[in-house]
Amino acid sequence: MCKDARVGRGGKGMKEQLQDGHRQQGRWILVPLADITTPKHGRVCYVSQWWAVTEHNEALFFEWYSSPQCNASKVITRRIGKGFDAPETKPRFLETAFLPHRCGDYAYGEEKGK
C-alpha cells in the first residue's frame, strides 16, 4: 500500500506515492536498505553504486524515487545528499539495488520532452 508524500512536483501539486515502510523527511524520501536490496517485480535495477545512507540504514532520495542519491564515485557520493535539511549520510557501496519507479519518469512525451 502507498501513502502520499507531502512534496509537490514542479509546483504542479503532484505527489509521490510512498511505498510501505518508506518515510518522508522534508524534501527527502528515506528507504530502508533491506527494501531496495531485495529484488521485487517491476523495479529498476541499479548496479555498482555508492549510496548516501543514513545512520538508520536508509537510502536517500530527493523528492522522487527517480532521484536516488547515488553515484559510481564514492567521492561524489560524500557530497550528494547535502543541503535542503538532508539527514546526515555516509557513502555505502551496494552491488545491486532495486528501486520503485514510474515509467513516466523515464519516458519523454508532450509534457516532458521539449
Image (cartoon, rainbow, N blue to C red):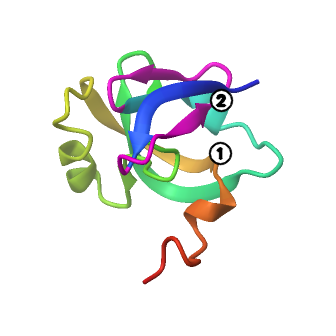
Instruction: Please name the residue shown 58% across and 26% down the image.
Output: 4
Q: Amino acid at mark 2?
A: Gln
Position in image of residue 51 (x %, y %): 40, 43
Q: Say which residue appears at 36% left-offset and 24% top-offset.
A: 54
The C terminus - image quarter: bottom left
- Whether pointer 1 and pointer 2 mark residues with C-beta atoms closer than 8 Å, the reply is yes
- Which of 90/17 is in front? 17
Is residue 75 found left or right of 2 in the rendered image? left
Left or right, 106 with reference to 20: left
Left or right placement of residue 95 versus residue 10 in this view: right
Outermost top residue: 56
User: Residue at image x 30%, y 59%?
Assistant: 73
Question: Where does the image place residue 13, in percent across and percent down from the top left?
Answer: 46, 40
Residue that badge 1 annotates: 100
* Residue occupying the far front of the picture: 12
Residue 61 position in % (x across, y down): 42, 40
Give me the residue at 83% from left, 47% from top: 41
Secondary element type, mark 2:
loop
Q: Nearer the viewer, residue 22 or 15?
A: 15
Is residue 23 shown above or below 36? above
Closer to the camera, 41 or 38?
Answer: 41
Using the rendered image of the protein, determine whether residue 59 is visible from the camera's viewpoint. no
**Amino acid type, residue under disc 1 in the picture:** Pro
Could you say where residue 53 lies in the image, as x and y percent from the top left? 38, 31
The residue range painted magenta reads 10-27
**Quadrant in which the N terminus is drawn:** top right
Would you place residue 112 above or below residue 98 in this image? Answer: below
Q: Which residue is mark 2?
A: 19
**Residue 11 is inside the magenta segment:** yes
Q: Secondary structure at mark 1?
A: loop
